[in-house]
Image (spheres, helix red, strand yellow):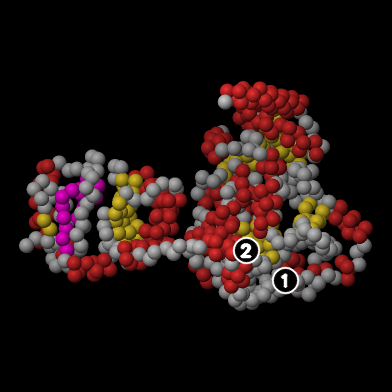
Amino acid sequence: MSDWEESGDEAAGAPPSSAVATAPLWQPPATPRPNSSPTEGELGRRGSEWRQEAAASVGGEERESGVVGSRRSQAARWRRPRAAAGRAQEAGEPLCFLISRALAGVLIGRGGAKIRELEESSGSRIQVIKGASEAEVKIFGSVAVQNKAKVLIDETVVSCGQSNCRGKSLDVINPENTPKKPVIDWASLRENRAKYEAMKWADLPPIEKNFYKESSRTASMSPEEVKLWRKENNNIICDDLKEGEKRCIPNPVCKFEDVFEQYPDIMANIRKIGFQKPTPIQMFYCRPRDERGGPGMLVLAPTRELALQVEAECLKYTYKGFKSICIYGGGDRKAQINVVTKGVDIVIATPGRLNDLQMNNFVNLKSITYLVLDEADRMLDMGFEPQIMKILIDVRPDRQTVMTSATWPDGVRRLAKSYLRNPMIVYVGTLDLAAVNTVEQEVIVINEEEKKAFMENFIDSMKPKDKAIIFVGKKSTADDVASDLGVKGVPVQSLHGDREQCDREQALDDFKKGKVRILVATDLASRGLDVHDITHVFNFDFPRNIEEYVHRVGRTGRAGRTGKAVTLVTKKDWKAASELIDILQRANQVVPDELISMAERYKQYQIRKEMEKDILRPQRKSSK
């Protein structure tokens, strides 16, 4: 007798002759898929062919049924003996369910990146078959692997704000085998927070922090000498943010020997790199190596480019065989996991990818004793605060923390208050927003349609050794401008978030090495891009806020050099005119009359709006 049966009007799919004998009952979804039903002639012909193949098949041989999309019938049933169901499941029978076709792209990701990540995290093989209105998901692997993959898929789909699958088509996993999530007693956790915190970190060794021994030369500096030295070195100001009694601020270190005289290996590295004296802000990580069971230092950076740049600087130093790794999205995830699990001392990472490895238990952050939050304001702007919070949950609270930021907005102050304990602040110059004084700033008030012609004239006037970054507001604009310049024979590269990682690295490398003298970029390049020989910054589009303007201008005039920043301002940028005038005046730059007029017009516009609101308020109250 045949191992499968069909009703009078079907026979759209025939099961394998032997494999069917060991499978549980399977019933396809009752709702037919649009444009997927085969014609009556096709059904008869295929049914006849499949009967012949089923009869000729050898025991144990498994055939593909070919039931994908239009080849699936509503009435076909496969029957397998229940006694053999467990063996078929262990042999790799897939877990199948349906999701909306719109969610298939979320599950697959760009270039298949998300589905590869899910496969690597769960150890399964995942197949997505798109239909007209739905997509079928098949998960191959053991029951445990299928369970893990299903949970990860559910989390991925739920995270995009939509519901998960429409319904299972296979009841492979028994409900009793699925562990129930325990109910969390939040009230009890809050009451016993200190107790649980102490239990969490009880097995960690204490941190040795005080390695610095003040030299006699540093200790003998008078208050007048300290004040003069700080003023001559970019007007350094130090303050204690601890509430209550203030602590004594140490005297500045004028020579490296005053700090590292007892560490000849570190001094050898400093001489090899070529540093003559400490810069206004300079930081070193130095501690005896021990068995920590994980990395000892973590540097978080907002962008891949900045993270890779920090790693390049770190690799210049060799101290007692310390190893470092850069972890970032877009890189080879499997290779990063392999290096981390083998053991590293310093981790440089972007928050998103590190949080991914942390959640999957590939990296142990409990051993971190020194934390650096680089460009903290930019990480907040990019929406990384949730990932940072999750990362810091697993970093011991008695760590040493350094947070750097070019600006000091409210968000950064809040972050400092949340994650730093009794910090001291060191700032160079002033906390007021100001551009670097080594850059000449020129502002041009112009019509939108004249911007491209002005930019082309600027490029034509560049000298052979000049190098410029052209900042734009949108990724599409970056591509358009770079394409237009390339067509005209101008060597150019573009840098923005939609480019593949290898293309981004190549663009930056070409610009650094001088293969191209013009880089068209979004604000991705406004932070941490350390190319010393940039002579010009050209703001084709005005940035979304005045802080980004300061960062853009800071890409030139670096390492003791001078630079020039040219900024195009149109009517739509009138909101920022007043703040831009303040920046120019602080740096003793020329303020165009058109910019002053624009600021006045916007001020009058705001006054009119407030007056209109005041007039409408009584009317609304009376109408009620």
Question: Is the C-beta separation of discs 1 and 2 under 8 Å?
Answer: no
Q: Which residue is drawn at 93% across and 58% down?
A: 224
Q: Residue furthest left?
A: 1
Q: From where the camera sits, is residue 343 visible?
A: yes
Q: Does the magenta run of residues contain 85?
A: no
Instruction: State whether residue 526 is above or below residue 202.
Output: above
The relative height of residue 191 versus residue 330 in the rendered view (above or below) is below
Image-quadrant location for residue 423: bottom right
User: Mark 1: which secondary structure?
Assistant: loop
The image shows residue 74 at horizontal and vertical percentages of: 18, 48
Which residues lie in the magenta part? 65-80
Tell me if I can see residue 460 in this picture: no
In the figure, is residue 428 to the left or right of 71? right
> Label 1: few (<14), some or many (≥20) within 10 Å?
few
Q: For mark 2, what is the residue?
A: 298
The amino acid at mark 1 is Lys
The answer to whether residue 217 is left or right of residue 64 is right
Marks 1 and 2, how far apart at CA = 16 Å
| On screen, residue 285 above or below 158 | below
Magenta region, main secondary structure: loop
Q: Quadrant of residue 147?
A: bottom left
Is 66 part of what is drawn in magenta? yes
Residue drawn at x 58%, y 52% is 384
Q: Is residue 26 left or right of residue 599?
A: left
Q: Name the residue under label 1.
A: 209
Q: How crowded is mark 2: few (under 14 residues within 10 Å), some or many (20 or more)?
A: many
| Mark toward the start of the polypeptide (1 vs 2) | 1
Report x, y in % for residue 105.
39, 47
Quarter of the picture holding the N terminus: bottom left
Q: Position of residue 233 (x, y in %)?
A: 83, 54
The kind of residue tagged 2 is: Leu
Q: What element carries label 2?
A: strand
